[in-house]
Amino acid sequence: MNAPNKYNILSSDDPKNIVLFYPHIPKKAVDYVNDTLHSRWIGQGPKVELFEQKFYQRFTAPNISLTVGSGTDALHLSYILAGLKEGDEVIAPVFTCMATNIPLLYIGAKIKFADIQLNTLNIDPKHVAQLVNENTKAIVCVHYGGLPCDMIELQSIAEKWNIPIIEDAAHAIGAKYQDKSIGSISDFTTFSFQGIKHITTGDGGMIALKDNKLMDKAKRIRWFGIDRSMRQLGLWENDISEIGYKYQMTDISAAMGLAAMEEIEDTLALRKQLFNEYEKRLKNIPGVQFLGAGYTDREHAAWLCTIVAEKRSELQNKLLENKIESKQVHYRNDRYSIFGGRQNNLTNMDLIEDKYLVLPMHTKIIIEQVEKVCSVIKSGW
């Protein structure tokens, strides 16, 4: 067996190892990128717009789509477009990748962390309802693992207080809530195309906007605050009136995205097959709870397979001994000092933080490997 390094990361070179993540590179991606490298456009060009159109047609319509350089870029621009300013209170999930909440610090917003639901790890609308007040300017939610949040409950709160919902759908490409695609529901939805997501462009992201009137501003602040279309026409008056950023996508990245869009249905189907296999085989195992299954009003995007396990460290060691990677992946954000330190009003997060564990699931895994993972867990630890 290849010895794991000090971070307990297994080598993907050994076919006997079952690694936690593996990038999905579409069959045509190499050809599409190669063609792009031999074209006039390698920065932001026609492939970026084509990728936006394809993504819009499949996932976000009627909400319009705009590519950016990363999922974090998408979140930051969404917060700006939502009108958030320094000192504004924003309710956000405590359990998520820190990239959800760090852009709120760019703005100087005051984050109020909401607790999670024990059966989903998604934001708890009941706690959101307790936290919201006249100073709240937005609600941020994350569809953990690919399972949509309780959007009706969150929308009811947002409508009552006349504030926007910003969905971080980094995990949720292909997810649905009440037959509506994630990306088509809220005022703002962001997606990630980071290396191990359903669609990867190396790194990259997308914003879906409900208000078409915000698109011109979104395009400007994506590119230094410049009206790029007017500049290319030679009609730009050489002034910048608002702070912008260098958050655009390149045609090299978009070429990968376009290749991924051609096989996204197969990618989603495979991930859901693996997820369902885990669900079936992990039922009725003492000390194990499988998260995210059994919902009929929403469709899981199957990005993460997460269990809750007693004696998690012992289980993790048992899996590693059998050449199987597992990790926590995300952590409660209030453990990071930049967010002000640990809070004492997050009861569910406190209960589960030492128990959740993410199991391997990606397009390089086969059913027999899922069977092995489940067999090791079933054997006890």
Image: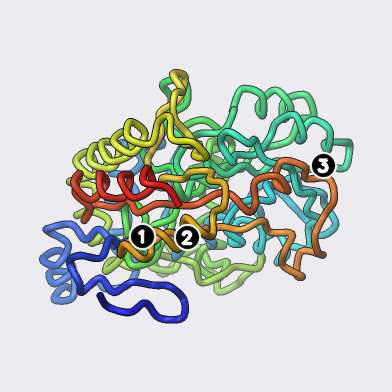
Q: Quadrant of residue 259?
A: bottom left
Question: CB of mark 1 within 8 Å of CB of mark 2?
Answer: yes
Instruction: Single out the mark in the foreground, 2 or 3.
Output: 2
Instruction: Give the CA separation, mark 3 to mark 1.
Output: 38 Å
Q: Is residue 189 visible?
A: no
Q: Secondary structure at mark 1?
A: loop
At label 2, which amino acid type do we have?
Lys
Q: Secondary structure at mark 2?
A: loop
In this image, 34 relative to 125: left or right? left
In this image, 379 relative to 187: left or right? left
Q: Position of residue 269 (x, y in %)?
A: 24, 37
In terms of depth relative to the viewer, which is nearer, 286 or 270? 286
Q: Which numbered disc covers residue 327? A: 2
Image height check: is 129 above or below 114? above
Q: Choose the circle earlier in sequence order: 1 or 2.
A: 1
Q: What residue lies at 60% left-to-right and 56% top-to-bottom?
A: 100
At label 1, which amino acid type do we have?
Leu
Image height check: is 161 above or below 39? above
Q: Quadrant of residue 283?
A: top left
In this image, 144 relative to 138: left or right? left
In this image, 190 relative to 368: left or right? right
Instruction: Single out the mark in the foreground, 3 or 1.
Output: 1
Q: Choose the circle earlier in sequence order: 2 or 3.
A: 3
